[in-house]
Structure formats: C-alpha cells, structure tokens
Amino acid sequence: MSILIESAEISREINRVHTYALANPIKVKDITKCKIAGDDPNHVILNGTLKIVFSYEEQPLGLMRHLSVSTNSSSGYPNQIVVERILKKFGFKMNPNIPDEKIKAKVWLDEQTKSVNIVELV
C-alpha cells in the first residue's frame, strides 16, 4: 500500500519542485521529442515507496500542470486517497471523482510505469 509521508521536509520538496517547474515549463517541441520530466531530478520527489513527478507543460491548449504518481511497490498503482492528497498539495482544482466540465483536466493510468497521471489547464 502506498502512503504519503507528510513532514516539513516533504513540504519543502513540493515547494522546490513546484517553483522549478513553474520557472522551467516544458515546451511542446520537447514533449514531442520525448523529454521526460521523471528523468530530471528537479521535477521528482521520492517519498517512501512513492515517486512524484510534477511539471508545467506548454501545450496547444495552454499551460498545463502535469502530475505523475507511481510506486515501487509490487502492489501496482498508488492508492486513490494518496493521489488526491498530492493533487491538492500541487494546487490542482480538479477532483478525480467528480467530473467538472469547467475544469479542463484529464486523468489516465500508464500501464508501463504503473503511474496515475493528471493534467490540468492552469
């Protein structure tokens, strides 16, 4: 089971990654060249069994937040409650359980990395 270990250190890490991502949005041309934020430690937080990757991306629709949460546990995907708590910490407005047409967002599971991915228009 995946859990989020909350502490002053994790709050600092979230702030570090968020600040870096906002100052260095990934460009569309880099997305199409398969630049992967998860390969850049400036976008990554390791927390217990969780790997949290956060970026801002300049996509055709506009500036998007992108969060990816995976676990190194053999249990598969991170649990929903943990993902929802992380979403809030990164300022996402959407709720994966309540579709809202006013919020431009998408949620998907990546089978290869066993990650939950969320993008949301800023």
Image (cartoon, rainbow, N blue to C red):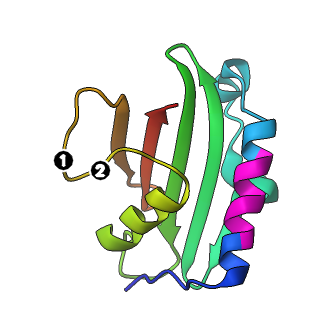
Residue projecting furthest to the top: 60
Q: Which mark, residue 98? A: 1
Does residue 42 show up magenta in the picture? no
Question: Against 119, is 63 above or below?
Answer: above
Q: Residues within 10 Å of mark 2 (few under 14, many from 20)?
A: some
Q: Position of residue 103 (x, y in %)?
A: 33, 31
Q: Is residue 4 left or right of residue 75?
A: right
Disc 1, disc 2: CB below 8 Å? yes
Q: Secondary structure at mark 2?
A: loop
Q: Residue at x 79, y 59 (%)?
A: 41
Name the residue beneath numbered marker 2.
95
**What is the quadrant of the N terminus in the image?**
bottom left
Q: CA distance from mark 1 to mark 2?
A: 5 Å
Question: Against 30, is 73 above or below?
Answer: below
Q: Residue at x 28, y 26 (%)?
A: 102
Bounds of the magenta segment: 12-20
Q: Secondary structure at mark 1?
A: loop
Q: Position of residue 93 (x, y in %)?
A: 40, 44
Q: Which mark, residue 71? A: none
- Name the one closer to the observer, 1 or 76: 1
Is residue 83 visible in the rendered image? The answer is: yes
